[in-house]
Image (tube, helix red, strand yellow):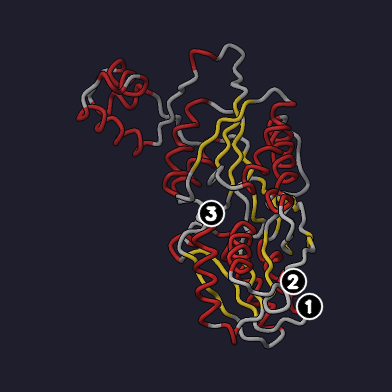
Amino acid sequence: MKKKISIKDIAKETGYSMMTVSRALSTPQIVSKKTKDKIDKVINKRGYIPNLFAGNLKSGKSKLIVVIIPSLRTSIFNDYFAGLREVLEENKLQPLVGITDYSLEKEETIINKFLGYKPEGIIVVGTKHTKKTKEILLRSNIPLIETWDINHRPLDIIVGFSNYEAGYNITDYAIKKKYKKILFVTSSTNHMKTEVRGRKRLEGYIDRMLKKNYKHNNFQISDPLDYKKSGEEIYTYYKKNKKKIDCIITFNEMTGLGFLSTAIRNNVKVPKELGIASIGSADVSNLLDFKITTINTNQHEMGRVAASKLIDRINKIKFDKRIFDVGISIVKGISL
């Protein structure tokens, strides 16, 4: 087992006093940039995690749970976080939330910083991390729950559903509805590097199309968080390739709703002329008269199960498995 790095070790390696190192960590504005940069460099190299919460811990328990999430701008993640927070608050635990904006590098920075608050557990949306993040998480020896995609080997415990199965099942449903020329919409290549969900869903779609000997086709939108723009991009592509497309499946529901709105505004007859489906269950769709056919990914339940399993881990309850599947289901709308 590696020796735990202390502030004394950092001071020795940098040549500064322990007080200077402490000031650089707690009140960086009062030390010079040169000093701060030198100390930060050694801290990153040695993997030192400062105890930022030390002065407030009498019981030895922070009651803090680190929650790492790509965004809270979408109803999917809001619904997930609501379920997670319910269970944490029921158990008098406080979420400490870090927003990554889908950046693995930002995830690494946030986790490294938040571990300084000595959390009792960590919940991370996503299963793809930088090599350094994996090392940090494993070295911390803190109970960890990864969520969303279960098609990965967990660092500790995974709670989620199969994104591959979601893509496969929604495509299968469209095929059974007699659609053959099905287009699958994902986000841009750059975004997909960190967004494993869309890639796995695309793989499920492709495999189902190949099984039926149908031609598969993928269109990438430029900004998955701009639903109006995405809807217009998809419509422009559809208009140019109308004869090759009789159904469009989007990798998330908000993108699907954005396109559905654009299609109806341009007098596309849905579903007679064009079928539309998506993956994910956004609450906003319940407010619309025209309900889109989609895959329910049970994100609220996922949040609750993730928090519950983390609490079990904190209480040293042993599991006979490391992967927990919350399941998916087809929600039938009138768009397909």
Helix, strand or loop under label 2: loop
Q: Are marks 2 and 1 in contact (CB under 8 Å)?
A: yes
Name the residue carrying label 2: 336
Residue 259 appears at what percent x and percent y?
59, 65
Q: Amino acid at mark 3?
A: Lys
Q: Nearer the viewer, residue 301 or 157?
A: 301
Upstream in the sequence, badge 2 or badge 3? 3
Image quadrant containing the C terminus: bottom right
Q: Which residue sits at x=42%, y=40%?
A: 109
Upstream in the sequence, badge 3 or badge 1? 3
Instruction: From the viewer's perspective, tell me whether residue 323 is left or right of residue 127.
Output: right
Question: Would you place residue 8 above or below residue 327 in this image?
Answer: above
User: How many residues crowd mark 3 within 10 Å: few (<14), some (14–19), many (20+)?
Assistant: some
Question: Would you place residue 264 above or below residue 111 in this image?
Answer: below
Name the residue carrying label 1: 177
Q: Amino acid at mark 2?
A: Leu
User: Spatial distance from mark 3 to mark 1, Cα to Cα?
Assistant: 35 Å
Residue 227 appears at what percent x and percent y?
54, 57
Image depth: mark 2 or mark 1 in front: 2
Q: Are marks 3 and 1 in contact (CB under 8 Å)?
A: no
User: How many residues crowd mark 2 within 10 Å: few (<14), some (14–19), many (20+)?
Assistant: many
